[in-house]
Amino acid sequence: MAQPYNTDLFRDDSLRRIEMATQSQEKKDVLIKNATGPYAREYKKIYEDQFAEIGKLWSGTRAITAPQVQQYLQQLVNKITAVNPDLVNSDARVIFTRDWWPNAYSMGDGSIAVNAGLLIHLNNEAELIFILCHELAHYKLDHTGKSIRKYVETINSDAYQSELKRLSKETYRVNQQLEKLSSGFLLSSRRHSRDNEAEADRQALTWMRRTGYDCNGIRSCLQLLSEIDQAESFPSPVLNQVFNFPDYPFKTRWIQKESAIFSQLETADGAGEKDSLRTHPDCGKRIALLTDSLAACEGRGQLFQAEENMFVRLKKELFFEIAAQCYRENQLSRHLYYSLQLLQADSAYVPLAAWSVARCLNTLYEKTKEHQIGSSVDKEGEEWSAGYNQLLRMLNRVRLEELAQLNFQFCRRYVAQARSYPGFLEEARIAEKRARLQ
C-alpha cells in the first residue's frame, strides 16, 4: 500500500550530516583553544555543554539533511544573503528538524535550526524568511557568545561571590536563599535575552526589507507565535468515539477531569514573575517596537518567491515526519496523539494512522508492564492543549488489561482498511494475543 506522502523527499544525506557535525567540531576546537585567562575553566565547561547539545542534533535523526529539502531551504537563505553584503561570507548553516515543538534557534556555532513543529503552522515564505533573518541576526550579533561572557563575568563578580560566601555561613533557610539568588540571576539573564530578541528583530527587518518579501510577514508571524503553544494542525481526537466499541464501551472515568487536577493559578505577583521568566518577550510588545518601521513597508513585497508548491508540501508532509520522530525518541503519548489526529483527519491517512496507533498501544502495553511508562508519557500540564491533556489523563488511568482490550478492539475495527499496510496485521496479532490472556 502506498504511503500518504512521499517518504523519499525526506531521505537524509548522511554525508551532509557528517559534514555539518565536522564544522561544529572545528568551531568547538577553536573556542576551547582560545579559552585562556583566569576563567578558562568556566568557559571550557560551558563550551563542552553547548557543543554536547549541538552534537545531539547531528548524531541522531532529528536534522533533515534530505537533498530536496536542503535545496529549498538554501534557496531561501540565498534570497537573504544575496542582497545583504554583511551576510555574503557568513558560515551559517540552516536546517529543518523533525522536532515537534514550535521553535527556531541559533546554536551559536553557525548552526541554525527551524523545527518542523514551527514550519507546519506558518502561512507563507515571508513568515519563514523573517524567522531565518531573525536567527541569522542572533548569530551575526554573537548573542550566544555575549550571553556566555555575561554569565561567566556575573558568577565571578565580587558581588555574586560575596553573596555565595555569606550564604555558606548561614544555617537557616539556606536553600531558599540560594534559590532566590539563582532566581535573581535568571531573571536578569532573561531580561538581557529580551534585549537580544528586540535587537535581532530590528536587524531581521533591515535584512528582510531588501529581499522583496512582504514585511507584513513579520507581524503575522509574531501574532502566530503569541498563540502557537496551543495551535493544532488537525482537530483534537475524539477519544470517546475512537475508543468506543460495541463489545467494549468507552469508560468515562478514563477522561473525566477532577476539580483539583491543576493547582490554582498564581496570584497577580506570581503571574508577573511567570511572565518575566518567559524566554521570549511578549510578541505584542515585539510588534509594537516595530510598528513604525513596518508601516513604512506597507503594501510592498511578496508572500512567495522561491517555491510555493514546496512550501505547501513541506507544511503538510512534515507532520508525518514529526509523528515518526516522536516514536523514535520514545515520546509515545505525543506520537499517539498525532496518530489519532491523522486517523480522524482524512480517509487517505487511515491505513498509516491505524498501524501507528496499534503499534504505539502495543508499545505502551510493554512499557506499562515493565513499569517504564513514566519516560514515555507526558504529565498533564497547563502548557498543553485540552485535547492532549485529555489523552494524557486517559493514559494515566487506563489499566494494563484495559489497554490490551482497547488495542484488540481498535485493530478489529480497522483491519479491513489497514490490513494491507505493512506491519498492521502483525500489530493486530500481538494485540489479540494479549487481549485473550486477560
Image: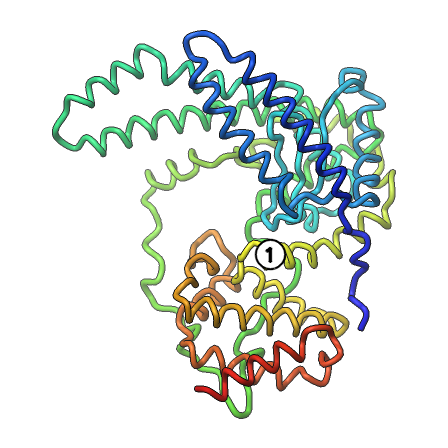
Position above or below: 31 against 424: above
The answer to which image quadrant residue 294 occupies is top right
In the rendered image, which quarter contains the C terminus? bottom left
Position above or below: 359 against 174: below
Give the residue drawn at x 49%, y 30%: 49
> Residue 268: x percent and y percent?
34, 41
Label 1 is placed on what type of residue?
A: Arg
> Residue 383: x percent and y percent?
47, 51
Q: Residue furthest left?
A: 171
In the rendered image, which quarter contains the N terminus? bottom right
The answer to which image quadrant residue 244 occupies is bottom right
Position above or below: 22 against 64: above
Give the left or right position of residue 97, taking residue 197 as reference: right
At label 1, counting other C-alpha atoms closer than 10 Å, the crowd grade (few under 14, some 14-19, many 20 or more) is some
Give the residue drawn at x 19%, y 30%: 174
The answer to which image quadrant residue 18 occupies is top right
Front residue of 172/43: it is 43
Front residue of 59/205: it is 59
> Residue 172: x percent and y percent?
13, 31
Q: Residue furthest bottom?
A: 247
Secondary structure at numbered mark 1:
helix
Give the left or right position of residue 367, taking residue 11 as reference: left
Position above or below: 237 against 115: below
Q: What residue is disc 1 on?
A: 328
> Residue 38: x percent and y percent?
41, 8
